[in-house]
Amino acid sequence: MKPGPMHPTAMGNVFWAGLEAVVSGVLAFAAAFIVARLIGPSEFGIGAAAVAVHVLLWVGVNAVFSDALVQRRSLGPTTAASALWASVMVGGAAALVQAAAGWALAAALGDSRLFAMGLLLAWPLPLVGAGGALQGLLTRQRRYRTLAARALVGQGLGTAAGIAAALAGAGAWAPVLQQAVGSGAGALTLLIRTPWRPRLVCRWAAVRALLRIGLPLTASTLVLTARYRLFALLLAGSAGPAALGETHMAFRLVDSVRELSFTALWRLTLPLLAEHQGNIAALRARCDRLLALTSLAMLPLCGAMALSLPPLVRLMLGPAWELAGVAAEPLVALMALLSLMFPAGVAVVARGRTGLALAGSVACTSATLAGMALLPPHDAFHAVLVWLGAQAVALPYALWLNGDTLGSGPLRPLRHGLPMLGVTLAGLVAALAVPRLTGEPAAAVALAAFRLAMFAVVVVPGAWLVAIGPGLGWFRRPPPGLPAHPLTGLR
């Protein structure tokens, strides 16, 4: 395999990226429900504290070169090899940090198991470094089938290991083992399935050129990831492990779906938008088109999650976890907003404006820490409100950056998602109002099914009108200025 461009069919790209997101989401939900129910909130909270550091390091190691390789206009074999070996070295350094963090957490939380947990979580990180560079090359080549294999095999084995450990009575070790196996197996799968073997060369000039894009982007991702990890540690100190476990479950229920779907969309859209980084009009038209398309799936998904998560949590986890389901609903609303902003956010990276994105991430994290200090929450729902308040503080800057990147006002990039937002809100109103007017079923499961049915009755025809319906259909009228794809001829 050479690190040059390759263009499989668009339908194949969407299929493999979508399959990865769907199967990974199902596995994440299954693991979250089963492991949490088996080990309880306190043990789940200890495991979450251990995994928090690993996830932060995993994100940094995996991201430092991957998107920079995709964004680059041209790429030679020396640059690709240099990126891979440099990424492996970054992973080795992260492994040392992970081991030291386990010792620090053991002292801070008074649980000696955390030191051994840190050692277990350290070993996959050099492999993750190699996998991150290969991810960038494969995304650049649109080899989504291989990328999907990494996620499906790694997460599948990790989920099996976590559930088996929980059934065996391992307690907080279950989520730790799940994370360690998933990270290691996923990276190994990518290395085995990629035929390209890099040269034994690492040129600092090539690495430095990639870091101009990769470092600010990675720092931005790390800051946002650290935002939640620091938030979780502060919550554990103010409200205790049980509240941390409930809050972590609320975030896991929503973020598992959001991160998987956004990751799939990111891999599909970043190469497309990077092709137009020098033409603002074409970039803006492409973003409009992508938002019109992604809103058809993402906004109804958010509506269905808002209706189903609270009863699902009560049914699957029992009354001890009920507050986690309630706390998840505001996070679903945030996911819907981020879905509307997503294509323009990818355009920021496509144009190489990662330094400005980093400033927004720092502001959001600072607001979160300030909120935790000024208004320390005592339960999961109030913790989520503090999180959303900090997001609201940083929102105007994010809207300005997205609009400025596309040469427009701050609200203009949201415009082509508003029709589907209206349809989704109408579906939620119908789902909540109709059962009250006709008489709500006594059983919680029947009520949830009834509400989802009413939601679908409104959303399905509404989505048809937005997509291809007469008069309103966006896809009947491609926007002016959107260039045809060089291979398919489609816009």
Image: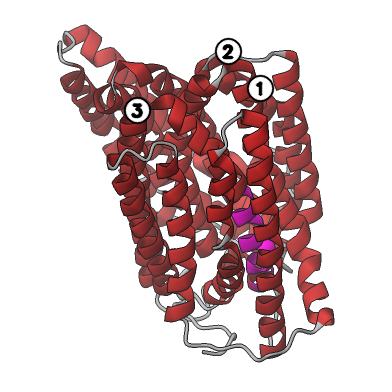
Mark number for residue 378?
2
Location of mark 3 (residue): 309
Q: How much space separates mark 2 and mark 3, taking CA atoms? A: 22 Å
Q: Nearer the viewer, mark 2 or mark 1?
A: 2
Front residue of 201 and 9:
201
Residue 292 can be seen in this image: no
Q: Secondary structure at mark 1?
A: helix
Identify which residue is drawn at 49% across, 33% down.
251
Residue 21 appears at what percent x and percent y?
A: 39, 54
The residue shown at (51%, 37%) is 48
Give, as a three-letter code, the residue at label 3: Leu
Marks 2/1: CA–CA distance? 16 Å
Q: Is residue 221 above or below residue 410?
A: below
Q: Which residue is mark 1?
A: 389
Q: Is residue 66 magenta?
A: yes
On screen, residue 322 above or below 200: above
Q: Amino acid at mark 1?
A: Gly
State left or right for residue 252 relative to residue 459: right
State which region is magenta.
55-69
Would residue 201 be visible to someone looking at this image? Answer: yes
- Work out which residue is located at the far front of the displayed protein and give it: 112
Which amino acid type is shown beneath numbered disc 2?
His
How far is the residue under mark 1 from the one under mark 3?
22 Å
Q: Earlier in the sequence, mark 2 or mark 3?
A: 3
Magenta stretch, main secondary structure class: helix
Q: Are marks 2 and 3 in contact (CB under 8 Å)?
A: no
